[in-house]
Amino acid sequence: MTRTSNPFAVLAILAGSAALLAVAPAAANDGTDASVFDVKVDKDFAEFRKPLASFLRSRHAKAPTSVCILGERHADGTKSAWVIWRGGHTMLLWDGGTSAMVASRRILDLSHDVVASEDDVAGSTYLVTRAWVTRQTQRCRQLGTTILFTKRGDFTPPENKQGDPHDPAARS
């Protein structure tokens, strides 16, 4: 490591490190400090059907397919919901209300944006670890709202909490 006596250089390095921490995906909304809430009864998230149907149609979802929604209340009082669509290899962070899921600030492609370890994240603002995805998926199966999107565009409860029988990833 190179030493410097220039105080401005040190401040620039510290500011750069703080900026990286501020945008790191693992630090924001990773679920580690979040309590879970039921999106079906929360006034800010209960109207998930229309934004979800619009998102699935925009991605040409083949029905039937299941989606799990995990509502999280964070330590700072904010709320968000992870929408996990294993059949579409997608996770997105939804802020609730009538906001379009397709315009989410965080849409993860589970085929490309997932890496093996924290070392592989290496300061990335979009990569997440396989362990984090597994943890969020398990939390959603246990505590979230799983629904089935049908050919007619309706939502129905799935036969079981294991997810879409047509989705091999949901069977694991």
Image: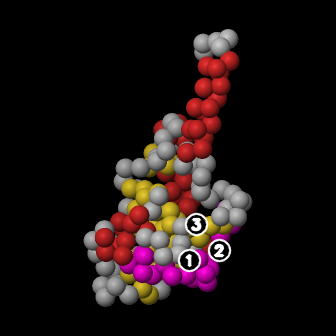
Tell me the crowding category of disc 2: few under 14, some 14 to 19, or many 20 or more residues within 10 angstroms, Cα based: some
Quarter holding the N terminus is top right
Helix, strand or loop status at disc 3 = strand
Helix, strand or loop status at disc 2 = strand
- Residue 78 in view: yes
Q: Residue under circle 1?
A: 45
Q: Residue under circle 3?
A: 80
Q: Residue at x 65, y 14 (%)?
A: 6
Helix, strand or loop status at disc 1 = loop
Can you tell which mark lies on residue 37?
A: 2
Q: Taken as a whole, is the magenta stretch helix, strand or loop? A: loop
- The picture quadrant where one finds residue 136 is bottom right
Q: Is residue 70 above or below residue 16?
A: below
**Image location (x, y in percent) of residue 165:** 38, 77
Please state if 153 lies on the left or on the right of 159 as rendered.
left
**Span highlighted in magenta in the image:** 34-53
Q: CA distance from mark 1 to mark 3?
A: 9 Å
Instruction: Tell me the kind of residue under disc 3.
Output: Ser
Instruction: Tell me the kind of residue under disc 1.
Output: Phe
Q: Residue at x 54, y 72 (%)?
A: 96
Instruction: Tell me the kind of residue under disc 2.
Output: Phe
